[in-house]
Amino acid sequence: MNRFIKLFPWLIVVIFGLYLVSKAIPARDEDGQMNIHEFGKLPVVYQGRVKPFDTLARNGLLVVSDKQSFIDNQGEERPAIQWLLDVMSQSEDAYQHKVFRIHNLELLDMLDLERRKGYRYAIVEFSDNIGKLEDSANQARARDPSQQDIFDIQIMALADKLGVLSRFGQSHSFPPRLNSREDVDNLKSQHDYLMRFPLPHSVPPGVEGEEWQPFMRAVLLAMISPDPNPGITHLGALFNAYHNKDVDAFNERLIQYRQHLASAGFVDFEPERLSFEVKFNHFKPFYHSSVIYIVAMLLCIFAWIGWGKTLNRAAFLLIAMTLVVHTGAIIARIYISGYPPITNLYGTAIFIGWGCVLTGLLIEVLFKLGVGNFVASVAGFTTLLIAHFLAGDGDTLEMMQAVLDTKFWLSTHVIVINLGYMGTLFAGLIAVVYIVRGVLTHSVDKDTEKSLGRTIYGVLCFGLLTSFVGTVLGGLWADDSWGRFWGWDPKENGALIIVLWNALILHARMGGMVKIRGMAILAIFGNICTAWSWWGVNQLGVGLHSYGFVDSVAFWLMIFVVTQLAVMVLGMTPKKSWRSVSGGSSSKNRVDSKTSPQVDPIT
């Protein structure tokens, strides 16, 4: 039994290590089938960068269906690249796939759809009502945003999803035979309408100096060009072969097109990088890391019940292994994009989570209380969950604003200021654990309280330093870009609030105005300050930093604020009512109100 207890932590690591290895095995096409996964490695330009078709497929399906795969009519799970090929080749199957997630009951009634598990539907199921849907969506868009209700928002969202499918399909279809001037005018009108929207630029330059083009535009130009772009011929043949389900023709054309791309020597065509991105997409390291962080969190909770040393060690090793994957995934994004790790809100979530996990492990090494493990796992899971929801809008490597397109400031100001966010949030999370455990359990004795107090204080010092330096660097960037160091922009004000609040907490602690409990309560309010600077100011829609707006985030931000205020109120209850003080434990080291003269609601 003792041997099993010693080996248990390593057994857990081996099990989940094998789980990660199994998920990292690249997808392969079966012999005698179309090499659709190889097609997914071909380049396309969309949303400001060259990416593989696999990424375009996953992002497009995620927008439409909230998933990166779909279930076909035979009940089999299929990859996103198959869905994209069905759409681009205008296959009949594209209209049969149940990929549209419609969960609003009023909208389901309007489209004459029955409720089903998963709430996913195919176009063919509501094609007769698409005209009614478009009319209702146009009426909703015409209303003032303040007067739009949930139904309006849902119907506009569904219309936008249909627009994604329509643009991906129509923009990659060959034009019909043109028999009259009216046919030409109709085609030109369709082309002009599509060009109002961002389209995938799938056709590489025909000659040096040209840019990538949308397929339909390239086809129209080829009609009047004496030297048509050979990329059109290859792509058109690929789509036709796929539409006709001609396996041999598709695979042969795929080889020819890859040879054409390699021989032409396009600067944008980097097959190794594209292939790596496809493997990265298939692995989904952040998703699987979040799963393991949940397991580690459960181990930490069970450790409070019993078998504490062994379970905490297992949690520590599991988190450490997951941190390696988390770190490697961030490095992989840097390699794929060619930019530092943070370029948008998605990047901030995975980076702040990474910082919290690393800090939690360091705290656990120093104090071995299990708290570092718990906070690391909670922060890792929560931030990756936030990142998952942020990924629903499309490419997470897309550059959000032109003002962000500078690698120097992205490598300095953005990283340092996010370290400031991380330090402040981590201190606040430790404070939450201290108060909740102190009030509700007998597990916070004097030594534990002192260790938690030192942890909160030390991390707050780190948070103050990095938030201050990051704010100064932000001012220098503003002076370089806009000609002024400080403009009282909401985002600048948010960063300043964090600096001032951290300074206030440390001043109050050093001056003896608060002790460990008071410092913890103030640190929890620091979570609110950080959430406001990180998310809240973006929702105002004003100022030079008003990028990263996310619908409905205000609701979840308010929920977070309420929970933090509730824990603060819990911490302000008289200390004699805390279970760590008042009952049940015979430990001489428990926090005892009779031996602490300063027992009041805020000290």
Image: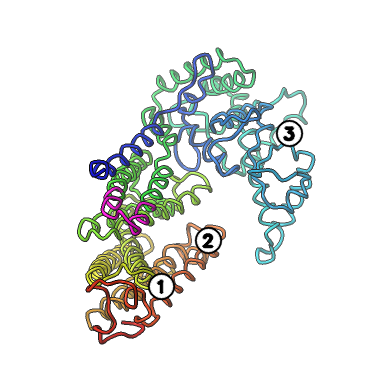
Q: Which residues are magenta?
A: 298-314
Task: Please determine whether, in this image, residue 542 is positioned above or below residue 571.
Answer: above
- Helix, strand or loop under label 2: helix
- Quarter assignment of residue 506: bottom left
Q: Amino acid at mark 1?
A: Trp
- Helix, strand or loop under label 3: helix
Rendering colour mode = rainbow
Residue holding disc 3:
185
Q: Nearer the viewer, mark 3 or mark 2?
A: 2
| Mark 1 touches mark 2? (CB < 8 Å) | no
Q: Residue 7 location in percent, x, y?
A: 25, 41
Considering the whole magenta stretch, tell me its main secondary structure: helix
Q: Amino acid at mark 3?
A: Asp
Q: Nearer the viewer, mark 1 or mark 3?
A: 1
Q: Amino acid at mark 2?
A: Val
Residue holding disc 2:
553
Name the N-terminal-most of marks 1 and 3. 3
Camera-nearest residue between 383 and 161:
383
Real-space CA distance between mark 1 and mark 2, rounded to the nearest whole angstrom: 23 Å
Camera-nearest residue between 406 and 502:
502
Residue at point 38%, 41% (across, down): 337
